[in-house]
C-alpha cells in the first residue's frame, strides 16, 4: 500500500504515513479522525513531530510534509532525528534521563496524547528526538546501554 500523498510505501498497520504525515485514507468514513483544534473538521494528516491530527485549515505543509500549526515543529523535524520509537512511556522517559545525564538534550513526543488508542495498532507511539548533530553520540550511548534504537540509525551514522 502506498501513501496517496507522497507515494511512500506504507505498512498496513500504519494509520498515518511516516514520511509525510498524511492519514492513510482521509476519504474513507471508517478512518476519520477529527482535527484537534477544529472539532468536526476531518483531519487530513498528523503532525510528523507531535502527532496532533490536523485538518486542511490548520495543517502546515513544509517540503511536502505535514506539521501542526506550532511553528517550531517543522524546524524540529529538520534539526533533529528520532533515536527511539516504542510503546513504552517509561522506556522513553528512561532514555531521556540517560541522554540528559550524558549532556544531550532531547525532546519526547507521544502520539497517545492526541490520537485515540484504537488507531495505534503499531508500536511507535512514543518518540525521543535529539539534535541531528548529536544523534550519532546519542545512538552510541543507547547502544552501549543495550537500549533499542530506531530505524533512523542508518541516517544518523552515515
Ligand atoms: Zn506520505
Ligand atoms: Zn506538531
Ligand atoms: Zn484544524
Image (cartoon, rainbow, N blue to C red):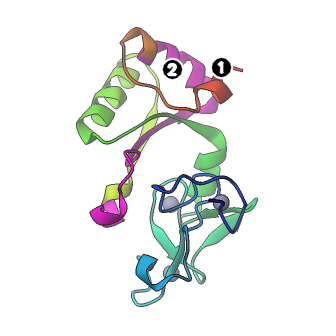
State the image coordinates of residue 146 (x, y, percent, origin top left). 36, 13
Left or right of 100? Residue 76 is right
Residue, disc 1: 157
Asked if residue 33 shows in the view, the reply is no
The residue tagged with tag 2: helix, strand or loop?
Answer: helix
Is 61 drawn above or below residue 129 in the view shown? below
Spatial separation of the CA atoms under disc 2 and disc 1:
9 Å
Q: Is mark 2 within 8 Å of ligand 2?
A: no
Q: Quadrant of the N terminus?
A: bottom right
Is 125 drawn above or below residue 65 in the view shown? above
Residue extending farthest top: 144
Residue, disc 2: 139
Is 142 drawn above or below residue 97 in the view shown? above
Disc assigned to residue 34 = none
Q: Nearer the viewer, residue 54 or 133?
A: 54
Pointer 2 or 1: first along the chain: 2
Left or right of 127? Residue 135 is right
State the image coordinates of residue 89 (x, y, percent, origin top left). 27, 41
- Residue drawn 38% across the image and 24% down it: 100
Asked if residue 88 shows in the view, the reply is yes
Left or right of 6? Residue 113 is left
State the image coordinates of residue 8 (x, y, percent, origin top left). 69, 54
The residue tagged with tag 1: helix, strand or loop?
Answer: helix
Contact flag, marks 2 and 1 (Cβ < 8 Å):
yes
State the image coordinates of residue 133 (x, y, percent, origin top left). 64, 26
Count of marks overlaid on the render: 2
Residue 139 in magenta stretch: yes
Q: Which region is colored magenta?
A: 113-142
- Residue drawn 72% across the image and 21% down it: 158
Residue extending farthest left: 90
Left or right of 56? Residue 107 is left
Q: Nearer the viewer, residue 74 or 118?
A: 118
Amino acid at each position: 500500500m502506498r501513501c496517496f500523498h507522497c507515494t511512500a510505501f506504507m505498512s498496513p498497520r500504519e494509520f498515518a504515513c511516516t514520511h509525510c504525515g498524511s492519514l492513510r485514507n482521509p476519504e474513507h468514513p471508517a478512518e476519520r479522525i477529527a482535527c484537534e483544534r477544529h472539532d468536526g473538521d476531518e483531519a487530513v494528516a498528523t503532525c510528523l513531530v507531535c502527532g496532533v491530527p490536523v485538518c486542511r485549515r490548520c495543517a502546515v505543509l513544509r517540503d511536502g510534509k505535514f506539521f501542526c500549526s506550532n511553528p517550531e515543529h517543522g524546524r524540529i523535524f529538520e534539526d533533529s532525528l528520532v533515536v527511539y520509537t516504542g510503546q513504552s512511556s517509561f522506556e522513553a522517559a528512561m532514555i531521556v534521563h540517560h541522554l540528559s545525564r550524558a549532556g544531550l538534550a532531547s525532546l519526547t513526543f507521544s502520539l497517545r496524547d492526541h490520537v485515540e488508542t484504537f488507531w495505534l495498532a503499531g508500536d511507535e507511539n512514543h518518540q525521543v528526538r535529539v539534535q541531528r548533530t548529536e544523534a550519532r553520540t546519542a545512538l552510541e550511548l543507547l547502544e552501549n546501554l543495550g537500549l533499542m534504537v530506531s530505524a533512523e540509525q542508518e541516517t544518523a551514522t552515515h
